[in-house]
Amino acid sequence: MDTTLALFLACYVVLLAITAWGHREIRAFLDGTPAIADSQALERFKQVARHNMYGALVQIPLGIVGLLAGLGLVVRHGLVGLAWVLAANGLLYALAKQMKALELRARSLPASSTELQRQHQHIGEVWVKRPLPDF
């Protein structure tokens, strides 16, 4: 197997695995938590947010390496390389788009009190706007 293709596939397999894991974790959270009803639900939300934030930090360098390997594939293999790049990115995009919808649902859950709502909203903002969880 071509080294460039192997590097590309390794990066995208890990990217897809991290995205699928985050997707599964958010879905499980939403299935078991229809609302932020108590501090335990808020703690579960914090855990989901933390895991997804750390996953995104791992995905950044992997995505850069994958992008460079993808460019190498296109240069070395032309249309066949481009087909690999488009297929992998299309799959990753589709999964990430579904995951973003789940993230929005998780950040939009109702809360049983004003204080829980305030904390839930703060965690959701940190999740979207900061690289590291500081909640």
Image (cartoon, helix red, strand yellow):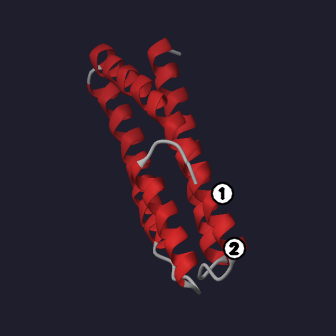
Q: Amino acid type of disc 2?
A: Ser
At mark 2, the secondary structure is helix
Q: Position of residue 38 (x, y in %)?
A: 68, 79
Q: Position of residue 53 (x, y in %)?
A: 53, 47
Q: Position of residue 5 (x, y in %)?
A: 46, 21
Residue hosting label 1: 47
Residue farthest toward the right in the current orientation of the protein:
40
In-image side of 45 versus 65 (left or right): right
Image quadrant occupied by the C terminus: bottom right
Q: Position of residue 10 (x, y in %)?
A: 55, 27
Residue 64, picture quadrant: top left
At mark 1, the secondary structure is helix
User: Between 56 and 117, which is closer to the camera in this rendering?
Assistant: 117
Relative to 59, residue 46 above or below? below
Q: Residue at x 56, y 77 (%)?
A: 115
> Viewer-nearest of labels 1 and 2?
2
Residue 42, picture quadrant: bottom right
Q: Residue at x 36, y 21 (%)?
A: 68
Q: Are marks 1 and 2 in contact (CB under 8 Å)?
A: no
Relative to 23, residue 105 above or below? below
User: Between 81 and 40, which is closer to the camera in this rendering?
Assistant: 40
Q: Amino acid type of disc 1?
A: Gln
Residue hosting label 2: 39
Relative to 44, residue 87 above or below? above
User: Between 12 and 115, which is closer to the camera in this rendering?
Assistant: 115
Q: Residue at x 56, y 50 (%)?
A: 52
In-image side of 60 versus 43 (left or right): left
